Image (spheres, rainbow, N blue to C red):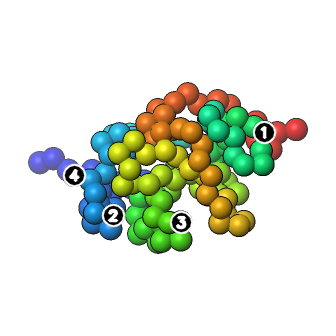
């Protein structure tokens, strides 16, 4: 007898997301969320192509990746249909439009609800190099 894997907080639930957005989840996202070692990475920085408006830094802090669940859908209603996949530790989110074929990652600034492009595609954000976090380090 073979046991079924136990769903975790970070298990992707494609049916919920696909039904809500009326799309098939990108395979790169399914593959990423199937590997707990990638999903559970915390506290790193990633280089972006377009600095966030008002900033000069070309790296952004990623605190953790987000679970794909009902909360993801609820947040998407507040962010013009964008789906959050990671957070910055201060309430901001990294998100993408799941209806876009080559989706660009955007940053949601929670303080004023503004959304800024990063210049990175979903694939680059998920598979790109990680750098040691310097955010909050004196």
Q: Earlier in the sequence, mark 4 or mark 2?
A: 4
| Secondary structure of the residue carrying numbered label 3 | loop
| Horizontal relation, residue 56 to residue 7: left or right | right
Tell me the residue that label 2 is attached to: 21
Query: Where residue 43 appears, x then y in whole percent?
Result: 64, 42
Mark 2 residue crowding within 10 angstroms, few (<14) / some (14–19) / many (20+): some
Q: Earlier in the sequence, mark 2 or mark 3?
A: 2
Disc 1: which residue? 56
Any part of residue 11 in sight:
no
Residue 136 can be seen, yes or no:
yes
| CA distance for labels 1 and 4 | 47 Å
Label 1 sits on a secondary structure element that is loop
Q: Few, some or many C-alpha atoms within 10 Å of disc 4 (few <14, some 14-19, many ≥20)? A: few
Q: Which residue is mark 4?
A: 4
Left or right of 38 in this view: 30: left
- Of the numbered discs 1 and 2, the one sitting upstream in the chain is 2
- Residue 79: which numbered mark, if any? 3
Between circles 4 and 3, the one closer to the viewer is: 3
Q: Residue at x 48, y 34 (%)?
A: 124
Task: Say which mark, if any, is on residue 27.
Answer: none
């Amino acid at each position: 007898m073979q046991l079924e894997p136990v769903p975790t907080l970070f298990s992707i639930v494609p049916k919920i997301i696909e039904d809500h957005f009326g799309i098939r989840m990108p395979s790169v996202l399914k593959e990423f969320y199937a590997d707990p070692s990638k999903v559970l990475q915390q506290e790193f920085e990633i280089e972006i192509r377009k600095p966030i408006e008002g900033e000069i830094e070309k790296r952004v802090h990623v605190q953790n990746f987000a679970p794909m669940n009902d909360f993801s859908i609820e947040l998407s209603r507040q962010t013009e249909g964008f789906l959050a996949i990671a957070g910055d530790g201060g309430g901001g989110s990294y998100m993408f439009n799941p209806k876009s074929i080559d989706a660009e990652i955007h940053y949601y600034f929670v303080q004023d609800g503004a959304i800024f492009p990063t210049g990175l595609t979903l694939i680059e954000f998920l598979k790109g190099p990680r750098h040691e976090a310097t955010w909050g380090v004196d």
